[in-house]
Amino acid sequence: MERIITRFVMALRERGVRISPGETIDAVHALALIGVGERESVRALLRLTLVKNVNDIPAFEEVFHRFFSSSQLGGMGLDTADILNAMIHIVEGEQLKAEKHRTKEKDEPLLAVDEEFTDEDLENLVGLEESEEDAAGADIMVQLDGFRGRMDKAEPSDYQMKSPPTVSFARNLGAGMQLSFKPEEIADMQEVVYRMLVRIRKDVQRMKEMESRGKLHVIRTIQKNYRHGMVPFLLSLRRKRKEKPRLVVFCDVSFSVSYATRFMLLMLHTLQNRVMDVRSFVFNREIVEITGMLRNMPVNSLLETIDRGDIINLDDNSDYGNTFRAFKEKHLENMRGKPAIIIMGDARNNYNEAEEWALEEIREKAGYMLWLTPEERDLWKRGDCLIDLYGSYCDRVEVVRDVEGLSRIVEDLFYTLYDHQDTRAWKGNRRKAEAEEAGEEWNYYKLPKAAASPNVTQESPSSAVWRERYGTYYRKR
Amino acid sequence: MITEEKVKELLRCGGYIADEAIATAVFLALQMDKPILIEGPPGVGKTALAKTLSSVLDFPLVRLQCYDGIDEGKALYDWEYGKQLLYTQLLRTQLDSYLSVSADLREAVERLSAEESLFFSLNFLVQRPILRSFMSDKKSLLLIDEIDRSGDEFEALLLECLSDFQVSIPELGVIEARQKPLVVLTSNGTRMISDALRRRCLFLYIGYPDLDREVAIVCARFPDICETLAEQMVHFLRKARELNLRKPPSLSETIDWAHVLSILRAERLTPEVVANTVGAIAKHQADLKQVNELASQVLPE
């Protein structure tokens, strides 16, 4: 029986469901308790013990159906004695392993099944239900399914975690029509964001410790220690409380940048409400707020909704000028505080009005403005790209190529926002330590700026004069 | 020996109509001493399952409502500083006489430190829900409600409790559960729960019930509602769930609505009845309108 479960688990892992050996043991254990009975109860049982995530349920159902309706086990020896022997062997091995963790009486049911296991049960187990199709044909179908799409690229298999997970924007441009994600992409992304969050959280903790070096707040301390008879066990200090940084994000969802945008959206989805207060908008010609949807919907169904054009019409070409004006008219007034604004897009305006005055007004209300573009610098001056114009209103313009880069930039932004006088000293140390730790990665992060510097030096003299007069390099058109 | 069928039957007695997956989960949780993590949309009976279980199995319910910022002082245990202080004050005179026999300061300190554990004993320990359920002599049901509202730190704190059923208190050592409680965790899925915690639990997803089960639930709860009305209601609500409402009506709304209709002694559904009772199903201004429109479309006058 263990073999069957193990094979089943392997099949699930191949579909991208993460299952640990501990869960496999649980499944076997549970199967021993309930016994191999009806198909339905076995299904419920395996689902309870193996699947730990709602999103994995469809994959499970599919694999279960495939696995237990085609009698894949034909190749194995069907001799009851053999299987029982193998089973006892494995169960004993497991008992040895499990003994440390489980109490004695827990082992009994595991043994009990060996005695009760009859030929009939075995029949049940092997072909939980007879498949209507020709069994051999089904088998081949299954194998074909397994091979499909694997020929074109050599990749580590799905159930081995890639370390470190890197997901590139450049890849797979052909599939850019679809915004929705493959499960492994989501997993990788969550991994990247999770690591970023852990880093940030550690530092926030440190910052909070720094903050606690304040003056004593006498009244609050007394109130807090009322139940301790006014003996100050818990101190309360006067400190300036930093609010969660506010962030407003615009994502271009038009076709040209959709692949990068989907990562941005996924990142926002993961970030939402964890360390920042984020408001998100998508646009191409119109602009629509999706903050609520990001919060309440699973990311894939949100992206599918966008794909279907339910939120904004995807057939429109992006019109940045119109977008900025619309934002200024509809949303600028109820923007609270001085949020940081991130704009994700290639600034290809399709020769519409630039309306940069709207962006300038938005800039006045923002604490910080960052433009992210998936396009390389070399391409900026070609065609309808307005990034030089729009970039002049931004504090920073960055090229993002992959998720790592994106998460770096967001992390960097976070520190900029959370900046605190006390924290500057250790921030430098942290950077240094991280650079040593990460080695190459750090250099890579600096590369885009270094690569850009020749560009600046090659300016024509007239533009240098221009720059002197107007102060910014970006206004040059 | 308890079986799955028996679990189902027991739950039915408590007014909870369980499906196969729920019954299996409860049965396995009881047999394997594993916590159940229940996920699902709000109002499908996650917490109700725990409450019903506690009443039908006669396990005292210990409930821990999670919120942002919950910590071990609120969930596991706390020291009763006030009482400790009071005792020190009261015992001061006793201490004088107790220590006066000692020859020098060194001996006095030794004598005192020998008694130190007195102040860090169970006497001064406030038991918070998790510890309380571990310490109870009767097997209890520990409901950790809406775990997704708590922070990551709290999740990490739960790991030890849920896998080994023990609580480590630095001053006292490890306290093991006298009776391993049946643990039920619920989550609305607003935040991803870490894999480490998921791994320690049986994962049960409760979605909206299927048609037959929902009708059965209504009939079981409100015997005076006839089956045709129940079916009509359920059909209507299932359509309403597809409407893309801001707050889709859940099972708890079905039950509320059935309650309302049974009080009003409605015989069958008409657009008018829906319009009068729409507050029980739709919880947003915009939703009200959509539900009413649906009623005028699908229901006979």
Image (cartoon, coloured by chain):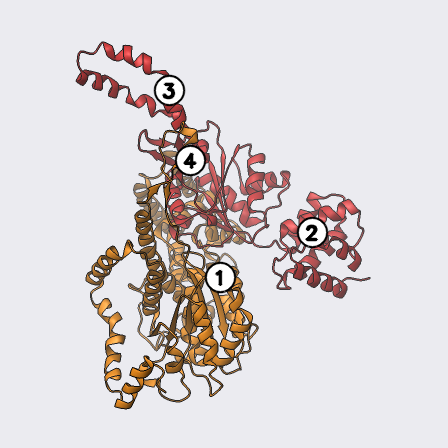
Chain colours: A orange, B red
Q: Position of residue B221 (x, y in %)?
A: 69, 43
* Residue closest to the eye, A132 or A95: A95
> Is the residue at mark 2 from the same chain as the one at mark 4?
no
> In percent of the image, x 50 and y 75: which residue is there?
A283
Amino acid, disc 3: Tyr
The residue singled out by tag 1 in the image is: A336
Q: Chain of mark 3?
A: B
* Residue closest to the eye, A336 or A385: A336
Residues marked 1 and 2 touching at CB (< 8 Å): no
Question: Can residue A131 be seen in this snapshot?
Answer: no
Q: Residues within 10 Å of mark 1 (few under 14, many from 20)?
A: few
Q: Chain of mark 1?
A: A
Amino acid, disc 4: Lys
> Is the residue at mark 3 from the same chain as the one at mark 1?
no
Residue A35 in the image: above or below residue B172: below
The residue singled out by tag 3 in the image is: B87
Q: Quadrant of residue B223?
A: top right
